[in-house]
Amino acid sequence: MASPDKLAHVVLRTGRLPVMTDWYANVLEGRVAFANEALAFLTYDDEHHRVALVATGASERPTEAHTGLHHVAFTYATIKDLLDTYRRLKGEGIHPFWCINHGPTTSMYFEDPDGNHIELQIDNFATPEALDEWFRSGAFEANPIGVDFDPDDLLRRFESGESPADLVRRA
C-alpha cells in the first residue's frame, strides 16, 4: 500500500471565472498556467496547477448548512512571509475575517469572491517531534480551536523585533 506523495490541487466551481481567477492569482501571488472560458489553472510553484476553477454557472454561496468543503489552507514558510502577505492584501482592501493561533498553526482566514474560505497559515513548530510533545502536554485538548489574535498587533510585534517563536507561542 502507498499513501499519496502530495495533495496536488483543489477545484472550485464558479459562475464568475474572471473574478475568481484574478482573486486567487493575487492572493496567492500565483500565475495563471492556463485559462479559457470554461476553466482556469493557477499555480504558485512548480506544480502545473494548485487551484483550478471551473465555470459551471454556480452562483449560490456556501453556507454552514451545506455539506462539503469547509476551507482550503495554504502554508507559508515563515511568519515574515505570512505577515508580508497580510500587509499586501490589507493594502488592497482584502481583510481576514478570522485570525487565530490554533496551536499547531497561526492562521488567517479569508473569503474569496464566491464565499469559499481560504486559510493562510504558518506552522508553529519547527519539527514534528516538538508538535507531538505539545499535543501530549494537554494544551490542545484544553483548547482545540485556539486563541484569536489581532493581525495588526502581530505585525507591530514582528516589526518591533519580537522573536518568531514568541509571536507564535499560544497563550
Image (cartoon, rainbow, N blue to C red):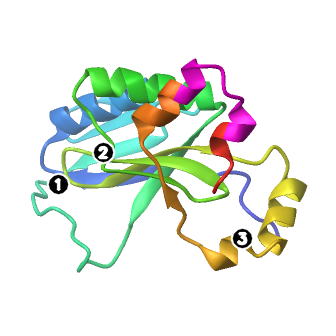
* Mark 1 and mark 2: Cα distance apart in space: 9 Å
Please give the name of the residue rendered at 56% of the width and 28% of the height, measured from the top-left corner. Answer: 157
Q: Quadrant of the C terminus?
A: bottom right
Q: Amino acid at mark 1?
A: Thr
Q: Residues within 10 Å of mark 3 (few under 14, many from 20)?
A: some
Q: Of helix, strand and loop, which one carries label 3? A: helix
**Quadrant assignment for the N terminus:** bottom right
- Residues at marks 3 and 1, CA–CA distance in whole angstroms: 44 Å
| Element class at badge 2 | strand
Q: Main secondary structure of the magenta part?
A: helix
Up-down: is 23 above or below 97? Answer: above
Magenta residues (range) = 157-166
Q: Which residue is mark 3?
A: 139
Pick whichever, 18 or 98, lies toward us.
98
The local secondary structure at tag 1 comes to: loop
Dot 1 and dot 2 residues touching (CB under 8 Å): no
Q: In the drawing, what numbered circle is on residue 53? A: 2
Q: Is residue 108 magenta?
A: no
Q: Is residue 46 visible?
A: no
Could you tell me which residue is drawn at 22 percent across and 28 percent down? 93
Q: Which residue is mark 1?
A: 56
Q: Amino acid at mark 3?
A: Ala
17 vs 6, left or right, is left
**Is 133 above or below relative to 128?**
below
Magenta stretch encompasses residue 160 = yes
